[in-house]
Amino acid sequence: MNPNARPFPIPVVAALGPGSQPEDETLDYMPMPSGMDTYRPPVLPEPEELAGHAIATQVLQAVIDAVAASLRGEAVAPIPLGGLPANELALVNQVLGEGEVSAQVLARPETRSFGADAVRVRVQESVFAGVWRVLAIDDDGALHDHIEVGAIPAALIEAARDDAQAPRTPPGPLPAQMVNVPTILVELADQRERWSPGQDAHVVNLTLLPLSPDDIAHIDHQLGTGRVVILSRGYGNCRITNTLAANTWRVVYYNSQDKVILNAIEVSTLPEVACAAQEDLADTHERLSEVLQWVEQA
């Protein structure tokens, strides 16, 4: 070593690599959903307990036939459950179980009265995707219980369509400081004007836009809130509500801690996250056929 050499001006670092250097900041990621609902086969009674349930077997066979018809693109009529003996209905309920999507249609505000049920239609997907239990309640209290097969029960689409056609008082003007809101409303109006059934959904992701909570509240006020509420619990939770604008839906995803991770508006017949796909129906046909074979063997 040269004794007259000057010291090296940059200190030598002996330890390199991850974790060797101090970090001024730590990344704090929002927790994502930690669980996902998957298909769980129904817990069936013992074979001797199933003996003699011919009516329940007929209902399940009708469901399988309806699924097959739907896969062929045919129109499928609802399968009524009214009048079934309690033990037969209990077996049907046990086989179908409860899936990840549920929904309800509220009564019109002008028809709601104190003490009356505010929910007019209750929907629960079974553990077999595309097979839905639908309970409709008339204004006079009469119940209509049936099974529907398809992407989504018709009552949800019909209620959203009726909401969009009902007379409505135009909302007031927007505050001048909400400079980003008019652009979003114009975009949605343009998409509604040009959208047609079968077209891909148009999604406006509010989470990625420079919007304040007041901005989003005013967008919701301008669009209005309809009577259809859908909850999908596939991966985290997704809450879907219709607006009073045609084919326009509010779609909000939550993580396992119920924090919003995606806030969107979708122009479509109904958001796909709530619907059963053709692949789901094909899987349902296979699984439900296996269950019916078990019941028939009893």
Image (cartoon, rainbow, N blue to C red):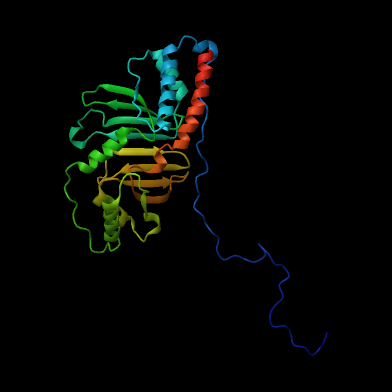
Q: Nearer the viewer, residue 15 or 45?
A: 45
Q: Which residue does the image show at 22% across and 58% down from the upper left?
A: 174
Height in image: 49 above or below 73?
above
Count up the numbered dots.
Answer: 0
Residue 152 image position (x, y, % from top left): 37, 35
Q: Quadrant of residue 208?
A: bottom left
Q: Quadrant of residue 134?
A: top left
Height in image: 56 above or below 64?
above
Residue 245 image position (x, y, % from top left): 25, 47
- The outermost residue toward the top is 52
Is 35 on the left-hand or right-hand side of 190?
right
Q: Which residue does the image show at 51% across and 32% down from the upper left?
A: 39
Residue 250 image position (x, y, % from top left): 33, 47
- The outermost residue toward the right is 1
Height in image: 233 above or below 138?
below
Q: Nearer the viewer, residue 47 or 194?
A: 194
Residue 73 image position (x, y, % from top left): 39, 33
Q: Quadrant of residue 242?
A: top left
Height in image: 236 above or below 186?
above
